[in-house]
Image: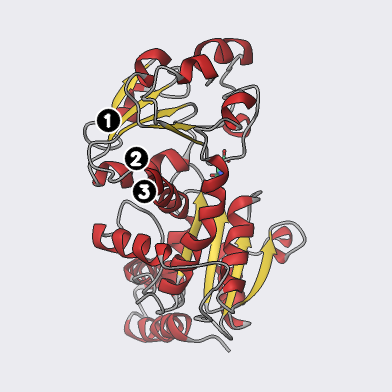
Amino acid sequence: MFHGRRGKSSRLRLALGSILPSAGLAAYDAAFVFFCAMNQPARGSLLDIEHLDSKEILRLLKLARGMNPRKPPPLLRHRRIALLFYEASTRTRSSFEIAAKALGAVTTLVQSSGSSIEKGESLIDTGYTLRAVGADAIVIRHPAAGAPHLMARHLDIPVINAGDGMHEHPSQALLDAFTILRHKKTLEGLQVTIIGDIYHSRVARSNCRLLSRFGAKIMLCGPPELVPQVSATLVPGLRITRHIDEALRGADVIMLLRVQQERLAGKKIHARDYIARYQMTAPRLKLAKRDAIVMHPGPIVRGLEVTSEVVDGSQSVIVDEVRNGVPTRMAILARALGKGK
Ligand code: NCD
């Protein structure tokens, strides 16, 4: 019933069993675990920005520019894409689904509530199940960092990371780069300021990795609880400031982040202090370059990290980011299934 890598690994299990009959279970399992760890993700997987070649990033951005969601090419007709979401999502999930359907694919949504995950099924077994019912690719969001990587090592179909814990959110970084390049000529030398909960943000991690790779200068801003000093080690050349005025002066791109209350785990952030020191307001925005753009991956908490005046103002590209999620994810899915030429 199972194909590809699963079959290969089962055969290897048997082979190891006959090679190592007296070595005991521990050695056998160690060898098996080693074999699994050696498995490469299927071609077309998108697991993070850190290990994605710069050429691949440029290729994906070019492909996304060529995608018209209103006149989509039927590149994925009769292909099946599973959307496996262990965490809440609005933008990411709907845009992956719309992107897949626009290209002609069939999608199936599996969420942790209402599926066998609630009954204790493991991540890998869920992957095998989706593979067995015929999924050609899996888009996965999971609260644990590395979950998509683990799944990719056990399956012979592409796995796409739609956000893994506090680790990465590669499709968001790609759509953010796509959005920036709609407004700015190049990423090289661009002053990008990221304000807010960087510590808990997979979006910030992926964006720092992508933007710095192409020469953007990044400044992180927030209180030590949300932007610890160690954040400076994320990529070379990153700077940190606790003062929003300093962060905004000369900025070309301002990225705002939600305070991730659900991940604070005992840390106390007082809304009133946060608003006083870090809320993005219209008067503060005047400190940035006149043509600066304001971004936010969403979900937005109006009145906390940003005022409605800024969200709905002329410099905001927040809705564009959501819209650009569709062509970007069309490109990611097309590449995943070998149609990204
Ligand atoms: C974010 C996420 O879930 O990583 N949103 C998104 O995907 N656009 C950010 C958040 O939850 O604050």
Residue 238 - label: 1
| Nearest the eye: 270 or 41 | 270
Q: Which residue type carries mark 2?
A: Cys
Say whether residue 162 is left or right of residue 271. left
Residue name at image x 52 percent, y 35 percent: 316
**Which one is in front in this view, the residue at disc 2 or the one at disc 3?**
3
Residue 231 versus residue 176 in the image, above or below: above
Asked if 4 appears above or below 316 in the picture, the reply is: below
Return the residue at label 2.
208
Which residue was labeled with disc 3? 181
Query: Dot 2: few (<14), some (14–19), or many (≥20) neighbours within 10 Å?
Result: many
Can residue 135 be seen here? The reply is: yes
Q: Give the Cα separation between the discs numbered 2 and 3.
A: 16 Å
Of the numbered discs 2 and 3, the one sitting upstream in the chain is 3
Q: Position of residue 315 (x, y in %)?
A: 49, 32
**Are the two marked residues, 2 and 1, in contact with CB atoms closer than 8 angstroms?**
yes
Q: Disc 2 on helix, strand or loop?
A: helix
**Which three-letter amino acid code belongs to the residue tagged 3?**
Leu
